[in-house]
Image (tube, rainbow, N blue to C red):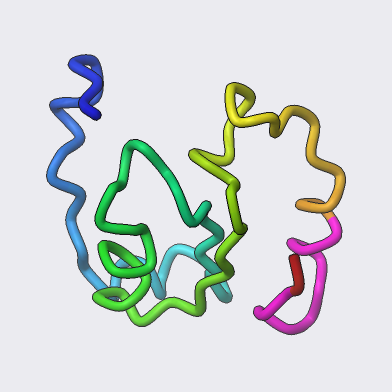
Amino acid sequence: MTVPALADFLPVPLVIDEVRRAADGTVLACGTDDPYCPEGAQVAYGLPLRLPTTMVPGGGHLNVAAGYGPWPAMLDWCSRDKLAFLV
């Protein structure tokens, strides 16, 4: 699935050092069935960027259309001392 408005942002640069400088730690959270990333975000981004990845079964694109509106659990995940978190 493509979104014309996003064409200028693609392909996404996969620069490990830049991702590591962006935050003290980064965890990739992605749905197992994201229609915008049919190869799977873990394969497309998690592995090349060496990011710990949490897969959300049936999560889709993890957006409002996929049923994720206000997401209080995200605040809990972001404030943990360890990068890994449970779904």
Q: Residue furthest top?
A: 5
51 versus 14 height, above or below: below
31 versus 85 height, above or below: above
* Quadrant of the frame with the C terminus: bottom right
36 versus 77 height, above or below: above
SS assignment for the magenta stretch, majority:
loop
Q: Name the spot of residue 53 as percent of width and height, x first.
A: 51, 72
State the count of labels.
0
Which stretch is magenta? 76-85
- Is residue 31 rendered magenta in the image? no
Q: Name the spot of residue 22 as percent of width and height, x first.
A: 44, 63
In the foreground, 75 or 47: 47
Q: Name the spot of residue 63 as percent of width and height, x first.
A: 58, 32
Side of 52 relative to 86 (left or right): left
Q: Name the spot of residue 49 as percent of width and height, x first.
A: 30, 74
Residue in view at x 15 percent, y 39 percent: 10
In the foreground, 50 or 61: 61
Side of 78 relative to 59 (left or right): right
The quarter of the displayed image where residue 45 is located: bottom left
Residue in view at x 45 percent, y 48 percent: 33
* Quadrant of the frame with the N terminus: top left
Side of 21 relative to 52 (left or right): left
Residue in view at x 55 percent, y 69 percent: 27
